[in-house]
Image: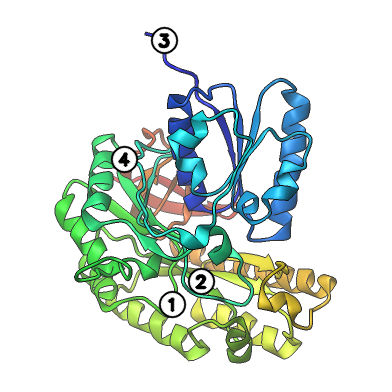
Amino acid sequence: MTPRPSPEVITFGCRLNALESEVIRDTGTAAGLGDALVVNTCAVTAEAVRQARQAIRRLRRQHPMRPIIVTGCAAQLTPDSFARMAEVDRVLGNREKLDAAVLARSQHTFAVGDMATARAADQPLVFGLDGRARAFAQVQTGCDHRCTFCIVPTTRGPSRSIAPMQVVRQVRLLVERGYREVVLTGIDLCSYGADLAGERPTLGRLVRLILSEVADLPRLRLSTLDPAAIDPDLFAALGNEPRLMPYWHLSLQAMDDLVLKRMRRRHGRDDVFALVERARRLRPEIAFGADLIAGFPTETEAMFADTLSAVTALGLTRLHVFPYSPRDGTPAARMPQVPHAVREERARRLRARGLELSRAFLASRIGAVAPVLAETEGRGRCPQFAPVRLSFEAEPGSIVATRMIGTENDHLIGERAA
């Protein structure tokens, strides 16, 4: 029997979007959308929206006869703007893009519901991510917080968690499919379980449950964590569970207390230093990365310097830096703005500092032996998520003992350990 063709999905934005794109591909295949082009958009920055529009126009030029479906956070936020594009055939919201019944209604050109009314998270099982050595398992979506710069609560709705045993089932399925590393992902990962009835399990308890129930899983990794909400069980798991990878990526956004207050973040500068110190006591080899916003409204050069100095003092090894992008409907968009050129210049300085710290970390790993998850084209990742170029052949998805013998172009070089 000839397999049904799958729609082509073009993904922008976060890991959760990447995971949902796999659901769209599977669900769209079953719905008979094999000839469709689906653009799964992001709305975190104006640049992400611009890139999505550019991609839509390019796809129409390249494929004049194929239907184009636009979905994701930008489509959820401003559906009319995409519906007005001559290149677009259908616009679907974030709930509708995962609904097989909606996908199958080809005559409906516009289906975008109100995410504020979303009250359940029920992620269809995903059998893996095409072309990836590691797999992602969604455990949560949405956010109940209202950071002044962020549009995500509007596009994703309130925080909703997936039941613990359903997450375990997903992870077990991925391991049975051959994945050796699974990444837990969500919009506000540390809020996991707060909306569930009964005992309201925390993220840390979920991690410990997964590692207990899925004994064949070699590596469990976490996506971005809120430093204000890391629970005691997660710290305990970090110290006691070697299969929990020693890399935490923190949603810091800034490291000046007044800027953090104006962002309406729930942590302060001292909180982050205490968190990092506690984690390093429990797991000395742990590495940290961070998301940071440069040029937030009202940020002075002295405030920016606080963030820049903290990046160095914390020894962060991987930075995701974004120049502030005003989003209509957020309080920060109404605050006094830092000039665009200053935002861009501060972002460049942060990225340069991050690159220096990353290179120093890589150099410190020379001579170490580490289990590396082999990916494609002779590359892989060590437990601290640092990229490694392998000087030997390894099956993608396998975990190989590797000795670090040098660095090149911002990655480690590794040989097979004896």
CB under 8 Å between discs 2 and 1: yes
Q: Going by the image, does 181 lie left or right of 70?
A: left
Q: Which three-letter amino acid code belongs to the residue tagged 1? A: Pro
Q: Going by the image, does 138 lie left or right of 210?
A: right
In the image shown, does 189 or 382 lie closer to the viewer?
Answer: 189
Rounded to the nearest angstrom, the CA distance separating label 1 from label 3 is: 49 Å
Rounded to the nearest angstrom, the CA distance separating label 2 from label 3 is: 46 Å
Residue 179, numbered label:
4
Q: Position of residue 221 (x, y in %)?
A: 35, 57
Q: Position of residue 82 (x, y in %)?
A: 72, 45
Q: Residues within 10 Å of mark 4 (few under 14, many from 20)?
A: many
Task: Tell me which numbered mark, 1 or 4, is placed earlier along the sequence.
Answer: 4
Rounded to the nearest angstrom, the CA distance separating label 4 from label 3 is: 26 Å
In the image shown, does 40 or 253 lie closer to the viewer?
Answer: 40
- For image coordinates 73% across by 80% down, the residue present is 297
Task: Tell me which numbered mark, 4 or 3, is placed earlier along the sequence.
Answer: 3
Residue 251, numbered label:
2
Task: Tell me which numbered mark, 2 or 4, is placed earlier along the sequence.
Answer: 4
Q: Residues within 10 Å of mark 1 (few under 14, many from 20)?
A: many
Q: Going by the image, does 283 lie left or right of 39?
A: left
Residue 227, numbered label:
1
Q: Position of residue 149 (x, y in %)?
A: 64, 73
Rounded to the nearest angstrom, the CA distance separating label 2 from label 4 is: 27 Å
Q: Which three-letter amino acid code belongs to the residue tagged 2? A: Ser
